[in-house]
Each structure stands twice: as structure tokens, then as C-alpha cells.
Image: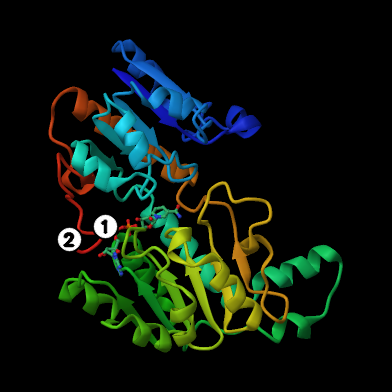
């Protein structure tokens, strides 16, 4: 079979660090294994436009492996050109870069390595909440500049204790964030999700569910976004919703950039409607050099904790999603059943409840 993988470029780092498995250089550690079984393996980071290696090779690929960190966007148009395609594997979690409806229609299965990096992301979320609330980034930048003016950074630094923190999406990552927030003695933990948490899980972390999104955001000092990107969440945090957000709230989004409206977020931060925005996901990846989220600031010069998409690609996470990808391929080649939690789209239908209310 022809297996096509779109991964990110590792450069010198990948030569020096073989555990960077998600790179085009280290190829998820599966080249030898695939070739020994007689499969063809094409790996590239060249993914944009009709002349890209991705688009040229998708036409006769049987299996497509992609990663959310450098997404190969499998549009409906490309699905129709991919005549042999049977299986898409997301090396990681989050398959919104694939036209899932088109895959349902064409009976192409979409699997991801569910759970492989949820701890990695939950830790990043907690770090991002703290760095915004405590005004860490401007404080560090001051030190690098050689300056020392405590009042300039203390003027916008707070404690997390006593704040209300809410998650949009209380799945694997959202719930792990709540668990990790328990020792901080927040005033209250809230969640907004059409899937309710099991009662005992909700009780363990003491979280309260809110059904109305505007009501939810108006109560939160910190909002963390942990739902997938789909028709129902694209642009969910937009100018209208931001009007209902508590003034001076902090937003952390490590889910997908396009869940938050790019310009509305930049404007809300600039005006002080929100005090901070942090995350690692962007509406387009790689983010263009002039993307407003790179440099946006609140009125006192802080509130930006943006980084490239890497929270779910720690070396620990890479080991897990590389091995999970291999297991999915092994099951597929040997006609063995897949782990049910990994199946986003089965043959001709959605298996996951996380990609919208169907
Ligand atoms: P999950 O499937 O365990 O949980 C997602 C939750 O979001 C579900 O409970 C679902 O009901 C809820 N949800 C869906 N639509 C919603 C809506 N309209 N409003 C409120 N809640 C909604 O997924 P998991 O593992 O927690 O991952 C969540 C997302 O995080 C992934 O889909 C991916 O986009 C992102 N992610 C980001 C990573 C990174 O490196 N930054 C790495 C891994 C995941």
C-alpha cells in the first residue's frame, strides 16, 4: 500500500534529538517497519497548493497520516481526488484539518491516537492560566531587557486562588485541567459541554455545569477552551460572545485557533475587555509573520502568552502518538479491530460524540 505522511520539519533539532519522532526526518520511527512489509512510504512537510508533494501524492495514496502540528488540510476537493484513500490517521488528537463529512460519505475511516497527548496539553493549559494571571511574560521580558520596575508588572498580577475558572469542553483534556486546578483553591470550577460529565467525575472535582454559553462566560475569570473544532465551534468565541465575557477575564485556547475569532480576540485584548489570551493553536498553521496574535497586547503591555503549536508534542507525547499510529496501522493491515476510542469516523459514520451534536 502507499502510505503518505505529512509531518513537520525537524531540521538540526531532529538530527540531534531522535526522540523528535513527529518530524519528516524521524518519520514516526516506522519507515523500516513499513518497507519491510512491502509498503511504500512517502513523507513530506510540503503541503500547500496543487504542486505540493501532499497534493500530488494524495491521488493514489491508500493511507494518509497527518499531524495537527503541521496540518495537511484534506479538503472535500482532495478527498474526491484521493481515489484509493481508505484510512486517515491523525498522529495526535484533533482531526478538524480533515473534511470529516466528506470522509463519512466516501467511507474513509478517520482515526486518531486518542489520549496520547491530553496530559501534555492539560499541563500547558494550567501553565498558561498561571502565566496570564500572574503577568509572567512581561515580567520576564523586563528582566531580559535589563530593567527592574516591580510596579510595572505587579500592577496587573493576581493570584489564581479565589478566581472562577471554566472550561468549554470537559472531555479528556478539559477534565484533566479541572483535576489539576483543584489544589489552587479556585472560587469555583465551571464547565460548558453538551455531553454531561458522569456525576461522580463532576463531584470529584466539584465542577458545576452551565447550559448557556453567555451565562457561562459572564461568570468566569478564566476561560479555557478544550473542545474540538467543528461546524458548531468554529468562531464560537466571537465579538458578540466577548461582549458577555467578564471584563478583564483571561482566555486560554489550546484546542484550535479557529474556535476563537482572530480579529475579535485581538480587539478585545487591545481594549482591555479581556486581560489576556494564551495558547498554541492558530487559525492557520504555520501562522503568518504578521498574524495579530503574535504581538497583540492589553492596554498595560502584557496579556499575550502565544507560542507555536507544541503543547501536545512534548517528547513524551511523541513517543505515545508514534507508537499509537503504528498500532492503528498494524490493526488496519491485519484486519484487526481498532480501539473504539480512537475512531472518529468509522465506515460511513461518525463514531465520536465530540465532533458536534448529531
Ligand atoms: P475529547 O473528545 O475527549 O473532549 C472534547 C469535549 O468537547 C467533549 O466532551 C465534547 O462533548 C466537547 N464539545 C464538543 N463540541 C462542543 C461544543 N460545541 N461546546 C462545548 N463542548 C463541546 O477531546 P480531548 O482529547 O479533550 O481534546 C479536545 C481538543 O483539544 C481536540 O479535539 C484538539 O482540537 C485539541 N488538542 C490540542 C492539542 C495541542 O497540541 N494544542 C493536542 C491535543 C488535542
Which residue is at a point 54% across and 73% down the rendered structure image? 264
Would you place residue 63 above or below residue 140 in this image? Answer: above
Q: Quadrant of ligand 1?
A: bottom left
Q: Quadrant of residue 80?
A: top left
Would you place residue 189 above or below residue 289 in this image? Answer: below
Q: Helix or strand or loop: what does disc 1 sit on?
A: loop
Determine which residue is flagged by label 2.
358
Q: Nearer the viewer, residue 48 or 328?
A: 48
Which residue is at a point 49% across and 47% down the rendered structure image? 314
Q: Helix or strand or loop: what does disc 2 sit on?
A: loop
**Do the CB atoms of the residues marked 2 and 1 lie less than 8 Å apart?**
yes
Residue 104: image location, x then y, percent: 20, 43
- The Cα–Cα distance between marks 2 and 1, rounded to whole angstroms, is 8 Å
Query: Is the CB of mark 1 within 8 Å of ligand 1?
Result: yes
Residue 260: image location, x then y, percent: 47, 67
Which residue is at a point 39% across and 19% down the rendered structure image? 41
Would you place residue 50 above or below residue 176 in this image? Answer: above
Q: Is residue 334 left or right of residue 55?
A: left
Q: Quadrant of residue 224?
A: bottom left
Q: Is residue 313 left or right of residue 306?
A: left
Would you place residue 331 above or below residue 155 in this image? Answer: above
The numbered mark at residue 355 is: 1
Protein image colouring: rainbow
- Within-10-Å neighbours for mark 2: few <14, some 14–19, many 20+: few
Amino acid at each position: 500500500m502507499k502510505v503518505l505522511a505529512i509531518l513537520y520539519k525537524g531540521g538540526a533539532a531532529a538530527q540531534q534529538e531522535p526522540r523528535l519522532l513527529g518530524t519528516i526526518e524521524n518519520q514516526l520511527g516506522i519507515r523500516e517497519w513499513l518497507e519491510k512489509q512491502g509498503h511504500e512510504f512517502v513523507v513530506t512537510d510540503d503541503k500547500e497548493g496543487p504542486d505540493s508533494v501532499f497534493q500530488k501524492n494524495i491521488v493514489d495514496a491508500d493511507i494518509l497520516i497527518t499531524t495537527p502540528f503541521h496540518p495537511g488540510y484534506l479538503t472535500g476537493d482532495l478527498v474526491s481526488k484521493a481515489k484509493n484513500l481508505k484510512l486517515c490517521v491523525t498522529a495526535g488528537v484533533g482531526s478538524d484539518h480533515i473534511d470529516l463529512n466528506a470522509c463519512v460519505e466516501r467511507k474513509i475511516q478517520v482515526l486518531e491516537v486518542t489520549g496520547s497527548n491530553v496530559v501534555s496539553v492539560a499541563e500547558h493549559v494550567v501553565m498558561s492560566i498561571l502565566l496570564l494571571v500572574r503577568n509572567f511574560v512581561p515580567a520576564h521580558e523586563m528582566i531580559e531587557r535589563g530593567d527592574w520596575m516591580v510596579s510595572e508588572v505587579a500592577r496587573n498580577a493576581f493570584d489564581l486562588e479565589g478566581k472562577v475558572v471554566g472550561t468549554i469542553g470537559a472531555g479528556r483534556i478539559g477534565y484533566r485541567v479541572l483535576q489539576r486546578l483543584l489544589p489552587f483553591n479556585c472560587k469555583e470550577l465551571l464547565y460548558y459541554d453538551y455531553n454531561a460529565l458522569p456525576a461522580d467525575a463532576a463531584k470529584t472535582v466539584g465542577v458545576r455545569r452551565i447550559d448557556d454559553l453567555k451565562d457561562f462566560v459572564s461568570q468566569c475569570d478564566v476561560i479555557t477552551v478544550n473542545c474540538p473544532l467543528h461546524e458548531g465551534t468554529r468562531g464560537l468565541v466571537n465579538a458578540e460572545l466577548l461582549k458577555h465575557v467578564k471584563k478583564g477575564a483571561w482566555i486560554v485556547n489550546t484546542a484550535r485557533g479557529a474556535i476563537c475569532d482572530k480579529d475579535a480576540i485581538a480587539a478585545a485584548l487591545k481594549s482591555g475587555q479581556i486581560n489576556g489570551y494564551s495558547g498554541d493553536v492558530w487559525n492557520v498553521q504555520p501562522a503568518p509573520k504578521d498574524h495579530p496574535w503574535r504581538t497583540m497586547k492589553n492596554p498595560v503591555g502584557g496579556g499575550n502568552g502565544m507560542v507555536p503549536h507544541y503543547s501536545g508534542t512534548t517528547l513524551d507525547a511523541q513517543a505515545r502518538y508514534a507508537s499509537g499510529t503504528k498500532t492503528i496501522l498494524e490493526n488496519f493491515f491485519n484486519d484487526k479491530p481498532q480501539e473504539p476510542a480512537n475512531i472518529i469516523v468509522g465506515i460511513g459514520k461518525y463514531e465520536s460524540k465530540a465532533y458536534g451534536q448529531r
